[in-house]
Every structure is written in structure tokens, then in C-alpha cells.
Image: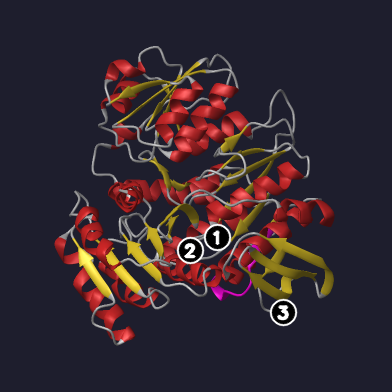
Amino acid sequence: MRAESSHYYKEKLKRLADHDLRLYDRKIPTDVKDIKKIHLIGVCGTAMGSLAGLLKEAGYEVSGSDEACYPPMDKQIAELGIRFFEGFRAENVVGADLVVVGNFSGPNNPETAFARDQKLKTLSLPEAFSLFFISPRHGGAGKTSLVVAGTHGKTTTTGLLAHVFQSAGEDPTYLIGGVTENEHHSFRSGDGQFVIMEGDEYDSAYFDKSPKFLHYRPNSAIITSLEFDHIDIYDDLKDYTQAFKFLAEEIPEEGNLILWGDDQNVRNLGDVAKSNIYFYGLKEDNDISARDIKVDKDGQNFTLVVKGKEIGELRTTLHGNHNLLNTLAVCAIAIANGISFEKLKEGLATFKGMKRRQEIVGEVRGITMIDDFAHHPTAVRETIAAIKEKFSERRIVAFFEPRSNTSRRKIFEDDYGKAFDGASKVYLSVPPLRHNDTREDFIDEEKVGATINGRARNPEKAHYYSNADSLLEAALPELKEGDVVLIMSNGAFGGIQQKLLLKLTS
């Protein structure tokens, strides 16, 4: 991470810190020598659990703790043979040579406090991944790092990119914030030159307010989109954009920066880059674009155009304009890193998608249930559009939980009101206030519902409830054969997917 960005986030930490700054001190390892036992605080998060799996496969003795461990991570942790502690206690850390701290854990967590007091080596998740799986070994050059960043589409794009490189025989290492349908894993330790990871812009740890992606030593990067998000840690759009500017500046001259060229905010990031730049998108002024797009129930066909020249026809199993853009981004970075057109074609055609991204989780009594991670209003709108594209003759019934720190705030009330135009019925469930919520800044579900109904000129289109169970009870009698129920949340949504399946089959 460059000195400019490091200074920026150190100053941010000072502004945000509400404790004695000495609580943020830590011992930082510079190599993996003498590290044998590793403990992860917050091990049941998707990314932390994946890192735990990679470290276990690499031969380290791994343990982890969390408040609780739910599917699918509980099964993965158990299958990997990782010792799991439910709850946070100082004794869980005893004997560890290295402690990896999840970004939800503050300085007063019993385990982080113990690690600090005992002067144990401590890293954030991205620092640990970089040290163990990207950094040079024994004087070598290190791995070639490919990072996928952006407000939207990171997980699907990273999963598709990892599959394309694996299908092409590159044997990559990868870390994804979701599980691929092809491998049923979110991580892989490969012997090849490439390391592929989802580059989250959220901060790294309580002691490091820099975004995760700045730790990944990117040789090439994709930036899929740029809209204000994570308002709990970024001041405004300018502050949020600065994180992506630092990422663009981080790419070396010989590297490649892949930018969504249809959006001016993303395109402008090229102004600060010194690397090779490739713009992709559906407009003809991009370096990488698509022509002759044909959609069917099983995916999309298109002709790939590179710098104005038609290269050949490709097929993706993914639906929606946003996924076509994700596919073009993968085409750009794959070609820039030496993947042939034929291998690219095979990889795209055989990708089965990601769990919790337009994932069909069941079909009962003619009702199809789809689970999706969408929570930002743009993601909600585009996901509904993609589902309508696939199920063009069927009614779309949307269940939505605004659960993330950003989606629970008033800032997106109007945007959510406009995001559900493509759905026939909408059921909203808003979780109760959390410790970091304030009533005056909390989303007003009544206002969102009124906007949805007003736009549809239908006072019965949108309904809102205080929890998933009451939502389900109200929605069940209204569901009809042929409906597609689209369930959207970045959390468990009270287990509504399984409860709906159970009630429909009983």
C-alpha cells in the first residue's frame, strides 16, 4: 500500500478512534517464518472462513472463534477440521503464533485485547492473505494478483474469473466472498502464478481503516461500478471514490486496469492510473464491448468486440445486463493476461453461477424460489430485471430485507421506492434498530412502500412487516402457481427461504 494512501487512512483512524490510540498498537509479522498456529477472530464470516480453509490446506494449525456459526460456514469449518470456539474468550488465543482479526471486532474484544497485551503477532484478513498467498517467497517475484473491485458485481465477477482461469488450466489460488456452483467452495489453493480475489472496499480492521483491496498487491484490477455505499465508514461519495482512486494508482505500469466505461465516475478513475487501461461496456466507444446480444431462458449469446474488431461469439449462462457487463470485464482481464479466446469461450459457457446470486433454491407447487444477496437499490433493480428476463411470462414476487448498515439508512429511501418497478408484488421486512442505528436516520418502510405503490398506481403492490415470520404469514395466501418468489437480503433473513419451502411442502 502506497505511502499516500497509508497516511490517508492513518489520519482517518485518528479521527474515528474513540479510545486511547495505544489500543490500536500491534505487533506486525513481516514473514511467515516461525508461524505454525494461527487463530482467526470472526472465523464464520465467508471471507474469514475461506482464509481459514486456505491456511489449513497450507499446513498450518488453525483455530477460530465467533459468536455463532450458521450454515453453510458451520459445515465448512467442521469438514476442514478447524477447531471452533463459540464466543470470545482470552483463553481461545493462548498458544497462537498469529492472530487474524475480523473487521467487526473492536479493540476491547477479549481476544484482541489479549493478543495486544501479550504482544502477539496480529494481522487483518487482507494483510494475512497477502502475506501468505501473494507476497514473494525466498527472493522470488511473488504471485500475479488479479483483484475484482466495485460497488456491485464483485462476487459474481470474481467467481466467473476464477472459473475461467481454472478452466484454462492456470491452476489459480482464489478467495471469493461467495460460493461457486461449480466447485461448491469460496476458496482454492493452486500452484499456478495467478491469485484472484474479491477486493472489498470496506475497511480492514479496527486498527486499519484502509479498504481491503489496497493490501492485495494488484497487478491487474477490475472496477465494476462506483456508487456511494458503506455510509457507516465513508463520509460521502468523494471519500468513497478516493478509495478506488488509490486502487487505480496502485496498479503498476505493466499491469492492467479494467474499467466500466459506460459510467463516467468509473471512467474517470483512468485519469489517475499509470497502467494499461481497458474500458468495457455496452457502448461502442469502449475497448471491449458486445454486439448481437441474444437472450434465452438459459443465458445470453453475444459477439465479443475488442477495439472495434469482432473476435467471435461467446455464451454466458448468466442473465441480466449487469451480468453481461460482469462477463465483459472478465473477458477484458483474461485477454490482457494471456487467456486465449477458445479457453475464454469454454470457461464462460461452463460457469454455473454463484450461490445466493439468482440461485434457484426450490420449486414447489409451481412456485419457484430464488435467493439473492442484493441489498443496494441498484442491485435490487438489476436483479429484478434479470429475473424478469429469465422468467418473462411469470409474476415476480419480491421479498426484501434492508439489513446492511447502508440499506437501513434514510439516504436510499427514494431509490428503494423506485427499485421495485419490475416486481408484481413486494413484501418488505425491516429489522429492529441496532446499536449503530438512530431513529432519525433509520429507513421509513412506510414511505418506501408508499413510493412503490404510487409508482405502480396500485395501493396493494407493496406491504411491510416488522420481521420475516409476519411477512411470510401474510404473503403465503397470496402466492399462486407460476409465481417466482425472489428473496433478497445480505443476511439470513430469518431463515425465510427454508421456512417458505417447508410451508409450501406441508
Viewer-nearest of labels 1 and 3?
3
Q: Residue drawn 64% across and 51% down? A: 160
- Amino acid of disc 1: Lys
- Which image quadrant is residue 44 in? top left
Question: How far is disc 1 from disc 3 in space, using C-alphas?
Answer: 25 Å
Find disc 1 in the rendering and name its residue: 245
Answer few, some or many: residues within 10 Å of disc 3's Cα (few below 14, many 20 plus, some between 14 and 19).
Answer: some
Looking at the rendered structure, the secondary structure element under dot 1 is helix
Does residue 373 appear to the left or right of 492 in the view shown?
A: right
Question: How far is disc 3 from disc 2 in space, using C-alphas?
Answer: 25 Å
- Mark carried by residue 5: none
Find disc 2 in the rendering and name its residue: 241
Confirm whether the magenta stretch covers residue 258: yes
Answer few, some or many: residues within 10 Å of disc 1's Cα (few below 14, many 20 plus, some between 14 and 19).
Answer: some
Q: Is residue 116 above or below residue 273?
A: above
Q: Where does the magenta region start and end?
A: 257-265
Residue closest to the far left: 439
- Which image quadrant is residue 39 in? top left
Q: Residue drawn 44% across and 24% down? A: 78
